[in-house]
Image (spheres, rainbow, N blue to C red):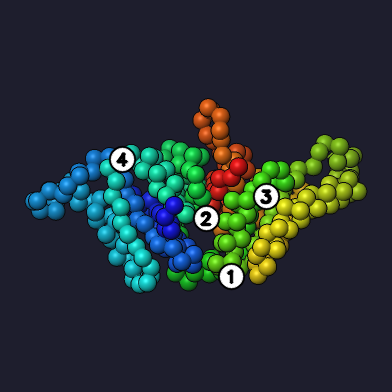
Amino acid sequence: MEQVVTVGLDGSAESLAAAHWAADEAERRELGLRLLHAWILLSPQAADGPGTDDQNYWARRIVHDAAAELRRGHPDLRIEAELVAEEAERALLDAAGRSRMLVLGSRGLERVASFFFGDTSLYVVARAERPVALVRAGGGESEERASDASQRPVVVGLSLHGRQDNLLEFAYVTAFTRGVPLLAVHGKGLPVQAYGPFGVEPGLARDIAESARQGLDKVLQPWREKFPRVRVIDEVRLESPAQAVVRAADGSGLLMIGRRKHTSALAPRLGPVAQAAVHHAPCPVAVVPHE
């Protein structure tokens, strides 16, 4: 695995926003940045004629312009460009496997805190072997506001079942490199018997919350010891896991969600919590595969 963050570029404002986010993240993690553009019609060798006659011209222009813009804000960051003559899905999955993180842009629907994904993004997020971060264009956000976002707490949504080492390591390293608190959230929906004639039975709800809190403490304890300098806020929310993580992401700098690696012959897919996160969280989302 190479010590780089890779961002997929397609010439859109969304992919350029993703490139800026990726440059910030690469610098914080002391990694290099790779700008990747994949186009199946890319020629193996540039034409000798004028740039307008070269079918690679716009592909090279996309990466060149992005690199020039990023170098102005990150003069010490190692930036490399890669043009690949492949289908985007295959190129991005290959790049994800060779990188510490893959970053993709996505389009926000008007006045709705959600993401719109094309087939490429969904395909890659559901299959990548490494974390994939999804970033929207800032919608006119100033540089000051974008910088402020990196100082906000980051959120990780946790299950209490199975190992989530990749997710937890990614979450703690992210909080540490940003120097911000980590909010660890577990959502627990109440069973039918918790509801009485006048609403939720407080005693039963309290017992369920306490049991979940003990489980969350058990999950987090080894990581608290491994990263003692990271301030962790653990929180159990008595609502569905999907609702819990989306609500917790409001005002945060990044939401991190796990995705179990699929070993069956069925097509890989995102679970309901990851689906809710990538479509509705009002901040960048990192989907981290784990066992």
Q: CA distance from mark 4 to mark 3?
A: 36 Å
Which element is circle 1 on? loop
* Earlier residue among tags 3 and 1: 3
| Image: 145 above or below 36 | below
Left or right, 83 with respect to 146, comes to left
Indicate the amino acid at tag 1: Gly
* Earlier residue among tags 3 and 2: 3
- Residue 159 rendering spot, x and y as whole percentages: 69, 46
The residue that appears at 65% across and 70% down in the rendered structure is: 229
* Earlier residue among tags 2 and 1: 1
Q: Which residue is mark 2?
A: 284
Q: Residue furthest left?
A: 49
> Alpha-carbon neighbours of circle 4 within 10 Å: few (<14), some, or many (≥20)?
some
Q: Which mark is residue 229?
A: none
Indicate the amino acid at tag 2: Pro
Q: Which residue is mark 3?
A: 158
Which element is circle 2 on? loop
Q: Which residue is mark 4?
A: 86
